Amino acid sequence: MWVIKIGGSLQHAAHLPDFLTMLVEHAAGQAVIVPGGGDFAEQVRQRQAEMDLDDITAHRMALRAMEEYGAFLTSCEPRLQPAGSFNEISRLLAGRIIPIWFPYAIVAENPSIPACWDVTSDTLSLWCAEQLRCRHLFILKSICPANDNYSAQYLSEKGFLDRAFADWMTKTSVQCWWLYSQNLESFMRMLDLRDYPATIMKKITAANR
């Protein structure tokens, strides 16, 4: 099983529906999608600044933003199904369906997850993979670092990942991979062959090179 975090930057990508269709056809029952926040999360950031919202309120709104993006993904590929609990995720996987994790019910009142912008869908995808005892997390982004540095510390410092990701990664055994959106067809072939690591992915390491 794989956890695949689909970044919000893919929201306007013309090839996103085709990717979701390929994912359903190649990885049914073997993948869990964690949605980013996309434009919906950016609206929360703006509202917090404009209205001086407290962090807990903004945190809960941001979780809802992830679910809005998740709903958008299901509109692109109706065979994907939302799941608000880990039991529901397991049920859908058993039925050879790819679930999209809707995090609010699990995360909103969870005291172990800080209510701040340091923890976004990036770190939540890592947390989700750990809870599911999944060995691999693929982070799908529309951009990649120009200097080919894929240390978690560097990616967090430069804003490619949220600020908490690097620290959280040191506390888990989940292997994290950076997947650039232009390599999606090769990624599907990798899923078919059950073969990894693959040259199309970049292994995210804990420390700077």
Image: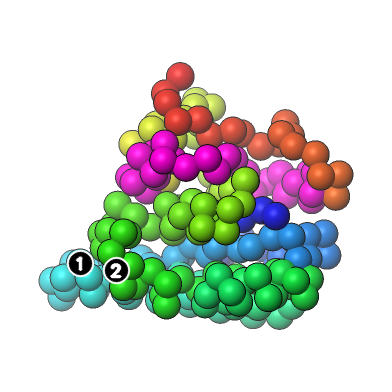
Residue pointed to by mark 2 = 59
Q: Is residue 44 visible?
A: no
Question: Residue farthest to the top?
Answer: 209
Residue type, mark 2 in image: His
Residue type, mark 1 in image: Asp
Residue pointed to by mark 1 = 55
Q: Residue at x 33, y 67 (%)?
A: 110
Q: Position of residue 199 (x, y in %)?
A: 72, 31
Compare residues 60 and 65 and report the one nearer the observer: 60
Q: Quadrant of residue 178?
A: top right
Q: Is residue 34 left or right of residue 27?
A: left
Q: Position of residue 105 (x, y in %)?
A: 42, 77
Question: Residue farthest to the right?
Answer: 193
Crowdedness of circle 2 by 10 Å Cα count: few (<14), some, many (20+)?
many
Compare residues 23 and 137 and report the one nearer the observer: 137
Q: Secondary structure at mark 1?
A: helix
Q: How many marks?
A: 2
Magenta part of the protein: which range? 162-191
Q: Is there CB contact under 8 Å for labels 1 and 2?
A: yes
Q: Quadrant of the C terminus?
A: top left
Q: Is residue 202 left or right of residue 167?
A: right
Q: Position of residue 54 (x, y in %)?
A: 16, 70
Rounded to the nearest angstrom, the CA distance separating label 1 from label 2 is 6 Å
